[in-house]
Amino acid sequence: MTEPVFQHLAALGSSFASGPGIDPVIDRMAGRSARNYPHLVAEGLGAQLTDLTVSGATTANVLDTPQRVLNHTFPPQLDGLPADADLVTITVGGNDLGNGLTTILAGVVGRLLSPIPVAGLGSSLVRRFRPARSEDVIDRAATTLVQIVDIVRARTGGARVLVVGYLTVFGDDSRPGPELPFDVAAIDDFRRRGEQVQEVLARAAAKSGAEFIDAGAASRSHAVGSAEPWVLGMTPLRSVVETVPYHPNAAGMAAVAELILTHLRTSGS
């Protein structure tokens, strides 16, 4: 296989790219790890890295909307895109479609509150943070992703763009338990949401002419509850500050990086 040659990698996206909780964390506000897949890919290529990823980002936060995290505001990620980037990775869209950590944790809390005799407290909380996925929301996310790819190419003079899918969190073998404190119906719903996010990213990549890295398909046997998970399940409360449940672990980030490097080596530079 021919080693690809790239000088400057720029990374855009949300937490499945930034790597919150994976040591060493280099930007806690952004939830950004020095061992996320952008860092590992840049290391493998011997390329300079501009990592613009921020946990919780939506497609709008990449495109043109500042992102507020506590007392800090991150500018739109495209504002920081270097003109000399010749390779750009994009992983975003899950938060647009209600497939982010807030939604999942609301399901956990809702389940815990469901026995409490306050009419509908648990179920109303779940509905509040599990918004309906209308076709308008889906189309908007896909359209914005295409815009992002087009702008990346225009601002960089034609950088190679990889739309990188999300790792599978809820796989076919994921079952209720300590790591997944949900009932079967909720797990199935989250699984469908994850599949929908992958479909949106694949659709946007095809429409824009970007290359799609199908991390979801590659990780179906590495979901929460599997023998070798690439994502974390629910953890004891004492370790939540150190790890982020339902997000990639170090092995998952390494796996995504290897998927990207293998794709680049086998598809030409």
Image: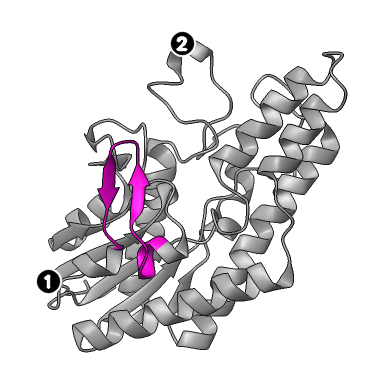
Image-based side of 48 in relation to 193, left or right: left
Identified at 88% across, 23% down, the residue is: 119
Q: Is residue 72 magenta?
A: yes
In this view of the protein, can residue 173 be seen by the observer?
no
- Give the label on residue 238, or none: 2
Q: Considering the image in quadrants, where does the C terminus appear?
A: bottom left
Q: What x and y, as percent, mark residue 198?
A: 60, 64
Q: What residue type is disc 2 on? A: Arg
Of residues 125 and 258, the one nearer the viewer is 125
CA neighbours of label 1 inside 10 A, class few (<14), some (14 to 19), many (20+): some
| Element on which disc 2 rests | helix
Name the residue tied to disc 1: 7
- Give the label on residue 184, or none: none
In this view of the protein, can residue 192 be seen by the observer?
yes
**Picture quarter containing residue 141?**
bottom right
Residue range corresponding to the magenta coloring: 61-76
Q: Is residue 19 magenta?
A: no
Q: What x and y, as percent, mark residue 266?
A: 36, 75
